[in-house]
Image (cartoon, grey):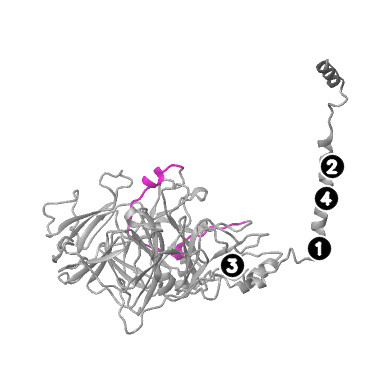
Amino acid sequence: MSPVLHREPVTDPRKVFHYTDLQRTKPTREDDPYEYQAGFDNRFQSEVIPGSLPVAQNNPQDSGYGLYTEGITYSAFAAPRHVNSSTYMYRARPSAAHRETPGPQQGYSDIETKSHIENSFLALNPNVQPLPQQAEWSPFPLPTDNERIDFADGLHTLCGSGDPNLKQGLALYVYMVNANMENKAYCNTDGDFLITPQLGSLDVQTEMGKLFLQPGEICVIQRGIRFRINLAQGTPTARGHIAEIWGSKWVLPDLGPLGGHGLANPRDFLHPVAYIDEDLHVPFTIVVKNTGRLVAIKQDHSPFDVVAWHGNCVPFKVRQNSRSTSSPTKQTFFEADLIQYIKQYDLTKFVAQNTATVDHTDPSVNTVLTAPSVDPHQPLADYLWFGPRWDSASNTFRPPYFHRNSASELLACIYGAGLGRSDEFQPGGCSYEGGHTPHGGFSDEYLVERALQINEPRRILQDQMTIMVESSRTFLFTEYARKICGVIHTQGTDPKVWDRLPDHFSAHPKTRELLARVARDKATHRKATDYYHSVDIKQGSPLYSSLSNSANA
């Protein structure tokens, strides 16, 4: 009898093949200090003090705790029930209670910032330019020890398409921070932030509660919700990536023939529970991003004073689209199931699908979240996962074939070796291929794979995680990405690499002989075919002769 093998739990989430290797009975990692609500397609509710959440009504005359009712709507008031999104909050002080300052902005004032924010990605904007070639960025520079950079100062736009004022498009960012947002909150009124940490853990506080975010996890914070991002204990510096979408919502892709389960499963998304600051009577600055412009407003109380809340406009640590995103009508985009939650999701829980017979599967099979566009046949953006999985195709060249996709692609390595084209592609950097730009990896592995006669099933991409945001749109890049960050490499793959790419066809001595034989065979075939076109059976025909004589008479 074979000996019984026992599994030993993996302790480092970056070393797991799947989250289940941690052998935890909780849906969160060991370092996560918070409790969450799990689920999808629901209206959540939470309260700090039992009984502080009103029963059977939204706006009581007196809830018994002296709280103020405040609503936030994510959709239009009269939107159909399946897309209507809002949250009621019961808080110590309303958000409208802010300090007035002189001037036409009624309390809002321009602020100085070290961040580089650009949200107008129209061709007439001279500050943004396309990159027709491949590009790659080394790890983006972290703040130095002699500067204090929090999230409001450490957010930088790389590229995008469209404009938030038109409610169409997206923008991609990096953040590098080494300080907490002390007495400061952030409010993005333009779109939804999808945050992917790469270095360091984040303590994310929202009006609805707290989220703990580590590399390998993601969260989405919807437009209009106030939040702050602090460094988790023991994290001196943090870096990561953000994808922002305008006029669309992150949803789960349809599964089609996969059935009811697979890819990112709804039960693995986590939502915060109500939490309030210990000291609510402290001055706060609210930094607001409006059409890419940063302004600020001051108030004498914490914005994190929500004692109870209920609703479906809640940050998450994504929303399952119960209507098809592939319907050939524009109704898909405008009537898609767009209710949103603040959620957290652990990318190591992704249930990968892949070929079990032959051929390389298209990367769309690794879609975690998708954002529909006005064109029902192509999304505004897809958020893709590339992590550990089995590779089992037979009789197949397994690495990706060279390709020219219609989508623009930006890849970012979260940890491990990553999927870049050169040694410059490291965690903390990213790479870009524009739509229809030829690309594909070439390395020693390529030569080894070409020589293999039999492929055995194997695990690939172990101990690494790479994400990709792809879009049907053409990205325009900011001055920060092209010049200021100082880590861009626009030559793409080193041309010297192609000197090692063997030309098996034209370099083979038999090729010229084969081509000469093909030419002879074509000539013989054409001569044989031309004969049939030279025959005229009308000549000499009795009927033809009689008709000719009648005509001449």
- Residue type, numbered disc 2: Ala
Query: Which numbered disc, 2 or 4, marks the residue that appears first in the sequence?
Result: 4
- Real-space Cα distance between discs 4 and 3? 38 Å
**Camera-nearest label, 4 or 3:** 4
- Asked which quadrant contains residue 331, the reply is top left
**Camera-nearest label, 1 or 4:** 4
Question: Residue at label 1?
Answer: 510
Q: Which residues are magenta?
A: 328-356
- Image coordinates for residue 339, horizontal then vertical, percent: 33, 51
- Real-space Cα distance between discs 1 and 4? 17 Å
Binning the other alpha carbons within 10 Å of mark 2 as few (below 14), some (14 to 19) or many (20 upward) gives few
Residue 434 appears in the figure: yes
Taking the magenta stretch, the answer to whether it contains residue 72 is: no
**Camera-nearest label, 1 or 3:** 1
Q: Which mark is residue 441?
A: 3
- Real-space Cα distance between discs 2 and 4? 11 Å
